[in-house]
Each structure stands twice: as C-alpha cells, then as structure tokens.
Amino acid sequence: MRRIAILGSTGSIGHSTLKICEAYPDRFAVVTMAAGSNVETAFEQCRRWKPKVMSVAREEDAATLRARLEKAGVGGVKVLHGPAGTVEVSTHPDVDFVVSAIVGVAGLEATYEAVKAGKAIGLANKECLVAAGEMITAEARKQGKPLLPIDSEHNAVHQCMRGGRMEEVTAVWLTASGGSFRNTPKAEFDSITVEQALNHPTWKMGKRITIDSATLMNKGFEVIEACRLFNLPASKVKVIVHPQSTIHSMVEFNDGSILAQLSVTDMRLPILYALTYPERIESDLKFNVLDLKQLDFQAPDLDKFPCLRLAYEAAEAGGAKSIALNAADEVAVAAFLSGEIGFSDIPATISAVLKVTPDVHPESIKKVLECDAEARRAAAEVVAHRRGVEAR
Ligand code: MG
C-alpha cells in the first residue's frame, strides 16, 4: 500500500491523482492533502477521503473548513493553513509518497522538506526544478529516493532512460507542439493580441501556461527541468517540434538507437507510472497504434521564439539565472495579459532581467525565494519602463 500526500489536491493533477486512487483502492491510500483557496472542493475531498491532515492557503479558509467539517459530522481531519501547514502535509510520518502539484514557488519548501524527510516524490511542479532543481536533485540523490517526473515529456524520458545507462545517453529529445504561432510570420509577432495568444489549438489550460506555450517558454522551462532531473548539460537536451504530440519525448544512445514513448495524452498515465515505479500495472489507458496516421517533425525557430534561447542560457548558468527566468516570465506574462506590454515585449523583458541578475547559486530555499523576489522587482521595473516608452 502506497500512502500518499497530495500537494495541490484541488488542481488538475490533484484530481487525476485522486481518480487513480479511486481506481486502485487496495494499492493507494490518501493520507494528507494540501489545497489552495478552493474551500468548497477541499471540504468535499475531506468528506470523501478522510485525510489525516488537510492544509489550505489562508487562516480564515482553515477556520471556515473546520466549521463546515464539524457541522457535517466529519471528524479526524486536522485542518492547517499556510506554508507551515503544507510542510506538515508533505513530511507527515505516515506518508511515503508525495505528489507535488502546487503551482508556483508556493510548492517549493514543502517539496524540498519532503525530499529531506526521505519521501519518494512524484513531481508535477515546474518551479521546483526550474528554480531549485540543483538543490532538490542533490538532496534526493543523498537520500537515495526517486524523484519521478509527472510532466509528460520528462515522464517519457524517464521511461526511455531505462533502456540504457546514463553514460550511454547522447541526447534527450523533448517534443513540443510548437504553440499557436508555429506558422505565424515573425513580422506579425508585434501585433499578436491577448485573445489570439490565449487561443491554443489543442489544449485547454491555465492562462499563464497557454501564453508560455505560445512563446515556447514552457518548453524552455522543460529544458531546464530535464537538465536538473537527468543531470545533463543543456547541450544534450534538444527540443523538436512535433505538432501531433503523439511521441511524448525520446532518448538517443551512443550506438545511434533512439527510444521514444508513445501513449494517450492523459495525465493519469504519468501519475500511475510514478506511483507504481518501478513496477507497471494494468490500466485502461490504452493507445491504439492503428490510429497513428502521421508524425511530423521540425526544428524550432529560435529567432522567432527567443524565449527558448533565453531558457538555454539560463539552463547553462543555473542558480539565480534560472530563478530569474521563471520569475521574470511570470511578471511579463501577467503584464501582457493585462494589456500593459505587447507579445514581443515578453522575451525582451525577461532578457533585460537576466542581464541584471548576478550569476550566483543560492544554497537554501530561503535564498531561492529572495532571488525570486528580486527578479520580480526587476521585471516590474522593466515593464513600467516599456509601458512608458510605448505611451510616448
Ligand atoms: Mg509538459
């Protein structure tokens, strides 16, 4: 029986994880959960799953949840709040596997503490690896516990890696759908509207990740994730545009063999893989090979998508530069969404922030969060400046 903590239980990865737990009740038990500000769903989850601990973001939400549970006669759930509550959820002595799916730097501390406490981790939070990947992977190696990627590309790479030894790997190929503007001429990028950028052809996702997919920054973050997870230099992590997204990623070995992973595009599969690793178990998530009609590939255009180039630079530098890449992107995307800056200003803003970011390597989560705050401040300044330039 795997005893699980879910960080981000009310989000989409949280929901998929609970579906897996529902389908295999004799294999998985949900022991603790952490949600954000969705008290209604947190309440329903407490009623259904009776976790030992449920943590929510704010103190007032915790009070509301406690009162509702009492009124409904649901006992035995300890309700906590804030970062300390999330850490208690991830390090609870009865937990042996943590699904880390809180979006943003909010999930950093709890994930790092879980690794330090010797838990196995299923990692869906990008910021953990982009901002603090060097620290988290070093600690996991020290603990001898697996860090299992739930991001579909890295999950695919993890599976393919089992076909050879680390020193035999010559390249990792991360596939990318290419975003909404794959075929848009560069000359038109300045006039891309918020509405156009939010209209992703295949996926319905959150606003930030939709914009990050359109700029290819999402793939850039994934390059950094792959470098940290598999301890590879950025030069060995390649991005290839594959519009059908059927191949989730590939690994190339020194003898010239390339292994690829194909499956349905359903996040339950990488979650199931992580939860049952190193075993595989029967599932109904089948992919019909006869449905495979066509597989197209092309190299990404770094001139059109400078975010990807910036990510490679940050991947190589690591430390504060990777932290700044993520922080500046979040600020720039928010500014684009609110109409303050244009689409092409997103990479320009990030580039300006990276230039003023010192090449240092923070050695604690506290220092990581300080670098993050500093980069956000710098990004806000750049945005204000660019807005001023446009107004003139
Ligand atoms: Mg991905």
Image (spheres, rainbow, N blue to C red):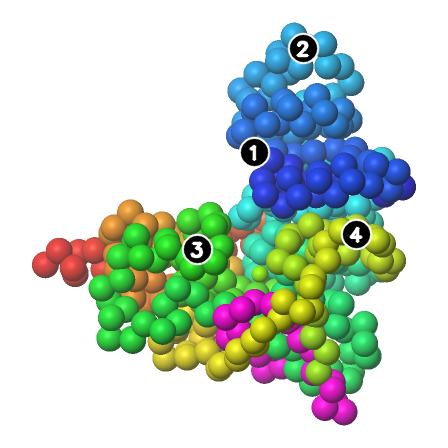
* Amino acid at pointer 3: Thr
Circle 2 residue: 72
* Camera-nearest residue between 213 and 262: 262
Give residue 283's mark.
4
- Marks 3 and 1, how far apart at CA: 21 Å
> How would you rate the neighbour count of disc 3 (Cα within 10 Å): few for under 14, some for 14-19, many for 20 or more?
many
Sooner in the amino-acid sequence: mark 3 or mark 4: 3
Residue hosting label 3: 210
Residue at (28, 69) in percent of width and height: 189
Amino acid type at circle 4 is Ser
Secondary structure under tag 3 reads: helix
- Decide whether residue 67 is among the magenta residues: no
Sequence order check, earlier mark of 3 and 2: 2
Q: Amino acid at mark 2?
A: Ala
The span from disc 3 to disc 2 (Cα, nearest Å) is 39 Å
CA–CA distance in space, label 1 to label 4: 30 Å
The answer for how far apart the CA atoms under marks 1 and 2 are is: 21 Å
